[in-house]
Amino acid sequence: MESMDAVSVRPRAKGRTKPTPDLLAKAHLVDVTAPGMEGLALWLVSRGLDVTGSIGAADQDSVTAARLREAGVNVAVGFDTRNVQEDRTCVVWSGVVAAAHPELDHAQELKVPVLARAHALAVLTAEPGRQLVAVSGSHDTATAAAVLAAALDDGRTGWILNAPAQGGPPGHGGDRRLVVDLCPDTTTHEAAPLGPWSYRSGTAHQYRRPRPAVTLITSATRNAPHFEDTIEALNDATYLARSSGTVVLPLWDKGAKIVHERLTDRPEPNVAMVTVGLAEDCDVWVLTPQWLGGEHLLTLHYQGTRHQFVVPVVGRHHALAACAAIATALVAGEDPQAVADRLATFRGVERSLAVLGTLDGITVRNSRARHPREISQDVTAARMLTERDVLVVLEPDGIARTSAHADELGAALADADYVLLLPVSTPLAGHDGPDPLDAVERAAVRALGPGAVHRVRSGPCEPGPEQRVFEMAAKDDLVLVVGTGPHTERLGPRLLERLAPADALGVGRP
C-alpha cells in the first residue's frame, strides 16, 4: 500500500524555478490542526505572513484551533473550494487525505502550487541568513526536537515541532536560526485514490531537500508506510547527512550507527561527523542517565569537560534523546551553562508519558507513540513508575501502518499487565480488507496471555473504553493511553471523570 506522502510529492514533470520563501507568503494549510501543521502555521504567522487554514468540524472547538486563531491564523471549519482563493501563493497539506479533496483539487484548477508539509519546510531553508538545525529519523524525533528547541532558545531561535514542550507552542518565529523536526511521522497517512492534485506540474522548489547547518539523526529503521524497509530508511538518512554541514549520530541506535559506518567508508569532505554514545571513545560521551524520581540527571563529556543537565523527561529512551539534543546544541556552539539555564525552565514534552491526573489512586498518563519501538519503550518506562499493574490502552495508528507492523505492535505490549485495544485510527471512510487489529490482538495474546488482552467492540450494547478501563483498573495502578487518534486524545480526560467515583462505588479489579 503506497503512502499518501509518496503519492503527493513525486514529480510528474520537469521544471526549473528558483526556490523562494515568497511561495509561503500567503499559504493555505489544509487540516491545519494536524500534528506538524500547527507548528508550521504558527511559525509562518509569527513571521508576519498571511496564513489561512481549514479543519474538520470535529476540531472546531479544540484547544489547537483556539490557539491558531489567537495567533492570527484565519481558520475555516469544513473543507470547501471557497477556502482556497486565487491570492494564495501555495496550499500545504499534511498527507491525511483518503479521498478526493475539494481544496487540493481547486488549488490545481487555480494553478496554485500544492506542497506536502515536508517540502514546505524545505522551502523555508531557501531564505538567506537563517541557520537550519534539523532533527530527523524514521521515529524517536519528538523529544529530541523539543529539547533542542529549548536548549537553543536564545530569543532569536525559532522552531517548527511535531510535539511541543509542555505549555509551549509547537511553532515559534526567530530570525537567527530555525529548529525543525523533519520526521515524516507527523500524523496518520493512508493510501488514497489519485485526484487532480496528484498530477500537478512539478517545480524544483517543490522537491528540494533541506540542507541543514546541523542535523541530528535519531534513528533509521523500517517505519511503514514512510519507509517500507530499513534500507530505504538508511538511504534517506544518509542522503540528508551528506546534505548537512554537521551531522550528529547517536550510536546507541543501530540505524544511526550504520549511517556512521557508511559515512566513514565513503567520507563526505564537506560534512563534519559527530558521534554521541555511551562509550568513552565517542565525540560526546554520555554517562548512564540517572533517574531522580521526577526528572533525569544527564552527564555529558564534551571536548574534555564534564557537563550536567537536569531534564524532566520520563524513561531512559527519552533521557537518551535529550542527551542527543543537548550534544547537538553543544556541537552548534552553545555555551553549556546557557543550555543548562534554558533547560531549567523546560517542563517536558507534551503527551510524552505526561501525567494527566490521579484519581482513586489510579494514575493516567498519555503517550503519542506510533512506531512499535516507541510504544515498547514507553510501556517499559511506565512499568518502572508503579509497583502495581500497568494497563495500556492502545489506539493503533493507521490501517497501512498497523497492517505492516501488526506483530511488532502486539509484541511491543509485552511489559504491560493488561491491554485494552481500541479500533485502528484512520481517515479512511471504509476498509475492505481484514481488520489489522486482529493480528495485533493475536500477537499481544502471545506476549501476555489471553486473559490480559481485551478489545473495545462497537455496538449499542457494548461498553465504551472508559467503562472498560473503569472495570479493569484498581487502586495504585497506572493507565497508559497510547496513540494520537481522536479517541485517545479525548480518552484521558474522560477516564479521569469516570474514575472519580470509583472509590465511593467500590468498583474495580481486585
Image (spheres, rainbow, N blue to C red):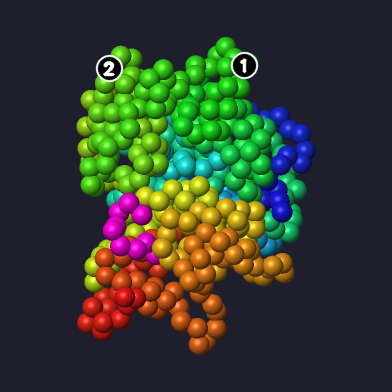
Identify the residue at image location x=52%, y=86%.
460
- Report which quarter residue 301 is drawn in: top left
Mark 1 vs 2, N-terminal side:
1
Task: Decide whether residue 383 is among the magenta residues.
Answer: yes
Whether tag 1 and tag 2 are in contact, CB under 8 A, the answer is: no
| Residue 118 percent location from the top left of the image | 57, 41
Residue at the limit of the structure toward the bottom, as seen here = 461
Q: Residue at x 49, y 19 (%)?
A: 273
Label 2 sits on a secondary structure element that is strand
Q: Quick check: can you spot residue 443?
A: yes
At x 62%, y 45%, the residue is: 226
**Amino acid residing under circle 2:** Thr
* Relative height, residue 261 to residue 186 (above, below): above
Task: Write the start and end of the magenta stretch as one range.
Answer: 382-391
Residue 225 x %, y %: 64, 49
Look at the image and tell me in which quarter the N terminus lies: bottom right
Q: Viewed as shown, does residue 260 lie left or right of 480? A: right
| Helix, strand or loop for disc 1 | helix
Residue 468 is one of the magenta-drawn residues = no
For residue 147, the mark is none
Mark identifier at residue 305: 2
**Label 2, residues with CA under 10 Å away: few <14, some 14-19, many ≥20:** few
Q: Nearer the viewer, residue 359 or 170?
A: 359
* Residue at figure coordinates x 29%, y 33% from the top left: 298
Residue 265's disc number: 1
The CA span between labels 1 and 2 is 30 Å
Quadrant of image for the C terminus: bottom left
Magenta stretch: dominant secondary structure: loop
